[in-house]
Amino acid sequence: MFLQETKQARRELREKFLQLLEAHDLDVIVYPAATQRPEPLDAGRSRYGFVSGTTEESALTGLPHLTVQAGWVGGAYPVGMNMLGRLYDEHTLLKLAHAFEEATRHRRAPTVAP
């Protein structure tokens, strides 16, 4: 029974997100990519035992999700921006993410890998 209830709750949550998109004529919902302050390297794991992110909305609803570079804190710590879209509309997510990256030029190539 628990599995049935879980599946139903996921469907209801997905429907709420889709209703929000529809009610406000949105292509995507935009929100921060992290819920904790940035830490150097892997300090989040040692400090908290995990690294927190906000991809749960996509995982729980099955809606497509994409993260782009949204800026920098103190010029050193990257800040991400999540986009959550409609079912089977990954094309819109990719198009909007590309347009955002081109317009802002926030992304920097990693310095730890070629």
Image (cartoon, rainbow, N blue to C red):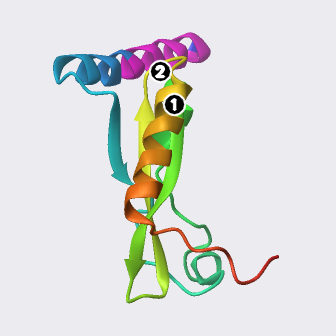
**Residue 24 figure quarter:** top left
**Residue 83 figure quarter:** top left
Instruction: Characterize the magenta stretch by its predominant secondary structure.
Output: helix
For this orientation, the residue located farthest to the left is: 24
**Nearer-N-terminus badge (2/1):** 2
Where disc 1 sits, the SS reads: helix
For residue 60, which numbered disc appears in the image?
1
Find residue 42 and report its horizontal and vertical position in percent: 66, 80
Q: Which residues are magenta?
A: 2-14
Q: Residue at x 45, y 69 (%)?
A: 106
Find residue 59 and report its horizontal and vertical position in percent: 56, 35
95 or 90, which lies in front?
95
> Which residue is tagged 2?
10
On the question of residue 63 being in view, the answer is: no
- For disc 2, the neighbor class at 10 Å (few under 14, some 14 to 19, many from 20) is some
Tell me if residue 66 comes above or below residue 62 in the rendering.
below
Tell me if residue 25 comes above or below residue 54 in the rendering.
above
Quarter of the image that includes the C terminus: bottom right
Q: Residue at x 45, y 14 (%)?
A: 11
- Is label 2 in contact with label 1 (beta carbons under 8 Å)? yes
**Is 12 part of what is drawn in magenta?**
yes
